[in-house]
Amino acid sequence: MLLTVVIFLPLLAAGVLLAVPRVPGRAAIGVWVAASAVDLALVGWMWWGFEPGEGASGVVDGLAYEADLQWIPTVDAGYHVGVDGLSLPLLALTGVLFLACAIYSLREPDRPHTYAALFLFLQTACMGTFASLDLILFFVFFDLSIVGMYFVIAGWGHGNARRSALKFFLYTFIGSLALLVGFIGLFLGSEERTFDMVALAANPPLADSPVAGGLVLLAIGLGLAVKTPLFPFHTWLPDAHTDAPAAGSAVLAGILLKLGTYGFVRIAMPILPDAWQRWAMVAAVVGVISVLWGAFVALAQTDVKRMIAYTSVNHMGYVLLGLGAAGLVASADEGARTVATVGAMYQMVSHGLLTGALFLLSGVLWSRGRTYAFDRWGGLARPAPVFAACFAVAAFGSLGLPGFSGFIAEFQVFTGALQAAPVATVIAVVGILVTAGLFLLALQRLFTGDTVVPSETDPDKPAEGPRPDRADGTTATAVQPRTATRMQDLRGHEVASVVPLLVLALVLGLLPRALLDVLEPAAMAVVELVGR
Amino acid sequence: MTGMSGGGERVLALLPELLLLLGAVGGLLLGLWTPQHRQWRVRLLVTAACLASAIAAAVALSEPAERVFEGTWVVDTTTGVVRIVVALGVTVLVWLASASLAGHPRETEAYVLMLLGGLGSIALAASGDLLLLVAAYLLASVPLYALAGFAKDPAGVEATMKYYLMGAFVGVLMLVGVAALVLAAGTTGYPDLAAQLPEASPALLAVGVLGVLAGVAFKAGAVPVHFWVPDVTAGTTPPMAAYITTIPKIGAVAAAFRLLAEPFADVPLDVPLLVAVIAAASMTLGNLAAFNQTDVLRLLAYSTVSQVGYLFMVVAVAARTDLAVPALAIYLAGYAVTNIGAFAAVAAVPVARTITDWATAVGRHRWLVVSLVVCLLGLVGTPPTAVFVGKLAVFAAAWDGGLAWLVVVAAINTVASLFYYLRWIAPAATGVAASESTTAAARGTGPGTSAGTVQRVVLEPVVVLHTAAVASLLLGIWSGVWLAVLLPG
């Protein structure tokens, strides 16, 4: 019951916001903040009362806060939700990140009612996906998250928002239908004909038909790979991110991408253990390619937000490397595989916090100068020290500096994967170097040197001063000798939204036990189930 | 049709149909003695008859399946679904049409024809005999010809002509098919056909199967006999378009389902494959043709062609899996609700024919757009709407019936369909978003809004649209309840 409240509380708030249109805009965002805060508090309460269990616990047993209602009896699909060590951290991450986005959007001027309602709707969809223990329910929430995100990008994005939104919707919708086809395959392949994840994981379907199992895994893997996104299905990501509003990008990168990786841990691995073992090397290799591709392409970007978007591809690659290594049963012992799985899960949480913060910070750039281009900004450390400090902390955390959560995650992934896939792991370490380089380069371009801010090209406001805009755009910047008045430092609500994310990343980097205690039993359970 | 063939037959087994017939005859008589401006009385009578029929059909669901009147009329779950959906659908459509029909010189006739067409649709679904199937085909066709051209404008007349000529032509094909089957088996009843046809000559059988399937495919608007659909839909008025693309399709799909499940189940031809190809062609061609439509009615017309494709997936596996009947039950209901909702959105702004006009016209009515988005995404099959549950069930049934390739084709088509629905959703949603801040004077949606100044939004279709959107969501979320009603035990 508590979990159901957690899932649907945001939706209820969204309904209230839409039904009462006379509320002033600020109050609407206030309702959003309040609803998200209450939701986060409830998740915190759930965490407080959650017993991680001894030894392997999760996925098929040790589920807390369960609720199970029938929905479509003829195909045995139901409203089955519950929490274990895999889902609880991601539920908490969802709560934290949505609250951060709510605070960040306190001054949203553009149709705040609908904006807040859409985000609350999205929060329900994300919470629901992480809490689902039924394939169809998972699919329902998974699809709704796409619909919600489409409207966020199309309605509040900038640049070529409608086209990017369409691309995002079509691309991820292909993925979700592949997923649906895979789910139907699991349903028909299972002995008792059910969509219930717990029952399916306990008694895996298609165990004795490698071809069918492989095809079903292909369909599910395709669906999740589009969402994650993995090379070569990542091409929707940079466009969607660049044109989405800052809070939308933060949610998209921080939460929606995790729906894909979470699907691998929750569905692909425990329910298709045979097929996962057989094809684990492919997962690891695709992970490594994503690591390198994401890193090198990010290095080449001239746009802050696109760069961060590509680092997401890179970071999700580590997750897949860890999960692939967890399936290489023959070449690694259970301990190593558990470490790799824990690392992958840790990376999901860590990436959500750090990349969420980075996207919110890049949104600050847009709000000040309507551009993300590197060459339009420079020397921002002087006029905006707090912004520079936050961005630097997030960037260092994201490149895997010890002391931040990203380090714990990547270290565990590499440790765990080294035994199973040594070559892949060594190649993936190169990715760390490249990301380190690109983040340092980004910091250098944005914060050092002479202060450069974009000239006023915003069509809303006429250009101030007689400065002519050059036609080629790239040189339409102005070096301002004095401290720029237009680059305002972080404002109160921006600090209040970004700093907690960074603090959490730091805490998880210094005191990893808090999270590991919850993750480890569940990761052990996954590894045991895969090893069957 | 009535109890001529034996006084001992259970006439009351046909109570839902009799109530509809009573409503039609009573409505006609009442209309004769009612002044023109009070014809809403007929509407009330028709509504009452439909609701009573739906209730009677729901009550009859709990009884075991039976064949009455010498096995020609089958009363089972499929018939029950069609009875309920058609009766409720006609009710809603009568009210949807009332906005444009009120005060019309032939208002009563329209309602009566709508009832009779619904009766024909139920008869299609319930036939257990080839000759009854032909009669039902006519009953489900003739009233619709009149309805298609009801406005008597050039476009409507052209649509009617096309519909009529094509209907007559396919009707002949169907008769040839029936004749061939009678020649092959020497009987017209489905159970006897099922026993005799496996030994019949393949050539005769092929002619028969093709002819009969052509008939039901025409009524359903499936490829390759779908050419009438866009022209009739765009030529007639939006409420009639909603009627023509919803009511007969339901009966025709159910009739095809019964044909595949009973007489064609064991024939030496691969009829399921034929139907699967029809399904794949319908959804693909429907989607491709819809891509570039700017006229909302034509867009919806092609969308109905593609929807029939998904429905025919379950027809193909009718004899092969237990999942087929519930899948048909949920998809038929979901399709009817969602499709009526989408057409109601068009009817709400009768003057707007293109997507842009529509988006501009509803600019200030935010809830209208929300409901439209629910209905259109419902047609795509986005959860948790009814069509999503239907699609899920249909996909599972088709795969279980050995047509995994068709499931993949359908999944790809679903993605493709998203594209053209979004072409309508995007301007509507973002257009509304842009003007929301300036909503200083959001007037009432009633017909009283000063006509002529702006494109007015009509009340009844708006109510229908909202109802359909809510019903689509509720039917999706509580699909278990709907199935429990239909399949007790």
Image: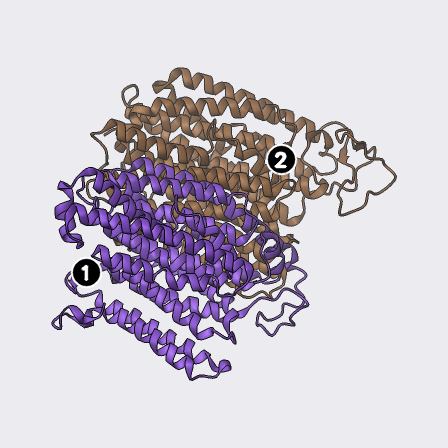
Q: Which amino acid does label 1 sit on?
A: Thr
Q: Same chain, marks 2 and 1?
A: no
Q: Name the residue under label 2.
A: A391
Indicate the chain on which mark 2 is placed.
Answer: A
Please report contact status of discs 2 and 1: CB closer than 8 Å, yes or no.
no
Q: The purple chain is which one?
A: B
Colour assigned to chain A in the rendering is brown
Depth order, front residue of A296/A515: A296
Asked if A91 appears above or below A402 in the picture, the reply is below
Residue B225, horizontal then vertical, whole percent: 39, 47
Residue A368, horizontal then vertical, whole percent: 71, 42
Quarter occupied by the C terminus of chain A? top left
Asked if A376 appears above or below B458 in the picture, the reply is above
Depth order, front residue of B106/B16: B106
Depth order, front residue of A309/B35: B35
Give the residue furthest to the right: A466
Badge 2 crowding class, 10 Å Cα cut-off, few under 14, some 14 to 19, many 20 or more, is many
Residue depicted at 15% across the width and 68% down the height: B5
The alpha-carbon separation of the residues under discs 2 and 1 comes to 77 Å
- Mark 2 residue element: helix
Horizontal relation, residue B52 to residue A489: left or right: left
Residue depicted at 38% across the width and 74% down the height: B47
Q: Which mark is residue A408?
A: none
Horizontal relation, residue B161 to residue B393: left or right: right
Q: Mark 1 points at which residue?
A: B72
Which quadrant of the figure has residue B132?
bottom left
Residue depicted at 36% across the width and 64% down the height: B117
Q: What residue type is labelled 2?
A: Phe
Depth order, front residue of B275/A345: B275
What is the image's colouring? Answer: by chain
